[in-house]
Every structure is written in structure tokens, then in C-alpha cells.
Amino acid sequence: MLEYFPTVVQVIPHEDCSVDVYFDDEKIVCCHAEKDLSADVFERIKEYCIFLDRCMDLNGTLAWDIAVETVLRCVMESRITSKKDLWRRA
């Protein structure tokens, strides 16, 4: 017999670093991010604008979208590296 795992359908972040997490089985859980997440994970999302603005339900889980910055930084660094390589080749 397969065990049912509820999925997240909605998240509502609050200014006190807590998040109300709504599940598809109608359960509601308050997650205190500063206490419930590991220190290194919370360190990446603790900025006010990141915590509140980038909190989301992603594939049925609670998540924060911080990958955009990482991707943009990688793209910028690769462009800089490739331009340096072009200058070296010329």
C-alpha cells in the first residue's frame, strides 16, 4: 500500500520570518524559517525582500526563488571570461 504525501498548494510568507503553508489535504502548518531551516539555508533567504517576495510553492514544496541571481551571475561571469579569451586570442 502506498503512503500518501500531501503537497503544498499555497504559501504565505510573513514579516516575522514565518510562512503559512497550505497543503492539499486541507492541513495548514506555520513554518518558522529561522528555527526550522538550517542556518546556512536561512542565511541565503533572510533578506527582507528575498524572504517575502521570492517565497513560493514550487512543485508541491515550499521554496524561495534565488536561482535567478545565480544564473545571471554565471551568465555575466561567462561573458566576461569569453571576452577576456577573445582579447587574448587577438
Image (cartoon, rainbow, N blue to C red):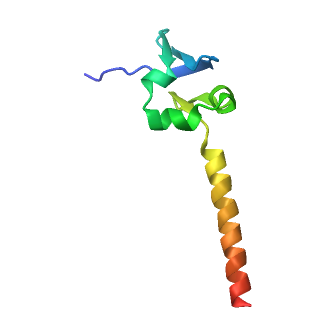
Q: Quadrant of residue 46?
A: top right
42 relative position to 14: left or right: left
Q: Is residue 71 above or below residue 49?
A: below
User: Does residue 7 appear in this view?
Assistant: no
Q: Residue at x 68, y 75 (%)?
A: 82
20 lies above or below 81: above
Quadrant of the rendered structure where residue 73 is? bottom right
Image quarter in which the C terminus is found? bottom right
- Picture mark count: 0
Q: Is residue 19 left or right of residue 78?
A: left
Residue 24, image x and y in percent?
Answer: 50, 15
The quadrant in which the N terminus is found is top left
Eyeballing the image, is 17 above or below 77?
A: above
Which residue occupies 45% across, 33% down?
A: 39
Q: Residue at x 66, y 28 (%)?
A: 48
Residue 41 lies, in percent from the top left, at 48, 36
Q: Is residue 87 above or below residue 21?
A: below
Name the residue nearer the viewer: 90 or 39.
39
Whole-percent x, y for residue 52 in the image:
66, 25
Q: Residue 34, percent across and down? A: 49, 24
Residue drawn at point x = 66 percent, y = 72 percent: 81
Give the farthest residue toward the left. Answer: 1
Residue 33 in view of the camera: yes
